[in-house]
Amino acid sequence: MRLRVIEGGLGVAEQQDSEAESRRPDREDVRREAARRLGASGYSRSRIMEFAVGAPMPAVLKYLAMQIDFAAEAISRLDPIPADYTSDLYWPKMDDIATA
């Protein structure tokens, strides 16, 4: 068995993390967070099922997607965008929608 040394490793990852922390968030960061939250909600899977099988997407998911899109747009317009823009404080939750 031959082993090779991997260049970089944790030192490079830590350096990239410190560079990411030093810059301010921008619109793309907020859009990525919105996409992450939509993906975690099951929206993408439900949308695919709607097109592929014809099963209607739950109205709760459509409403959640609309709220996440609105929140992302509102956060993107803040100047400066808060460093904690990923906090649940800024984003809608599925629990709030299901009980509304």
Image (tube, rainbow, N blue to C red):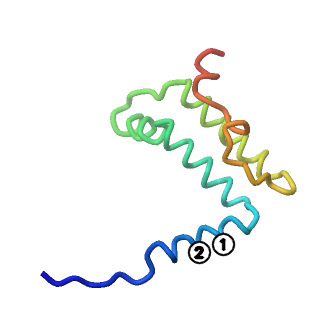
Using the image, determine if residue 51 lies above or below residue 81. Answer: above
Tell me the residue that label 1 is attached to.
19
Residue drawn at (38%, 31%) of the image: 54
In the drawing, does residue 76 fall left or right of residue 36? Answer: right
Q: In the depicted view, which residue is nearer to us: 23 or 67?
A: 23
Q: Which residue in the protein does label 2 denote?
A: 15
Depth check: give the residue in front, 11 or 52: 11
Quadrant housing the N terminus: bottom left
Q: Residue at x 65, y 67 (%)?
A: 20
Q: CA distance from mark 2 to mark 1?
A: 6 Å
Q: Position of residue 70 (x, y in %)?
A: 72, 40
Find residue 64 and name its label: none
**Relative image position of residue 55 (x, y in whole percent):** 39, 28
Residue at 76% from the left image edge and 64% from the top image edge: 24
The residue type indicated by label 2 comes to Gln
In the rendered image, the vertical position of residue 12 relative to residue 70, given as above or below: below
Disc 2 secondary structure class: helix
Dot 2 crowding, Cα within 10 Å, few <14, some 14–19, many 20+? few
Per the image, label 1 sits on a secondary structure element best described as helix
Q: Is residue 21 above or below residue 59?
A: below
Q: Of 87 and 47, which appears nearest the observer?
A: 87
Q: Residue furthest top?
A: 99
Which residue does the image show at 46% across and 42% down from the upper left?
A: 44
Image spot of residue 97 (x, y percent):
62, 22
Q: How many marks?
A: 2
Image quadrant occupied by the C terminus? top right
- The answer to which image quadrant residue 51 occupies is top left
Left or right: residue 25 versus residue 55 is: right
- Mark 2 near mark 1, Cβ–Cβ under 8 Å? yes
Q: Nearer the viewer, residue 67 or 99?
A: 99
Residue density around tag 1, few if under 14, some if 14–19, many if 20 or more, within 10 Å: few
Q: Position of residue 13 (x, y in %)?
A: 52, 71
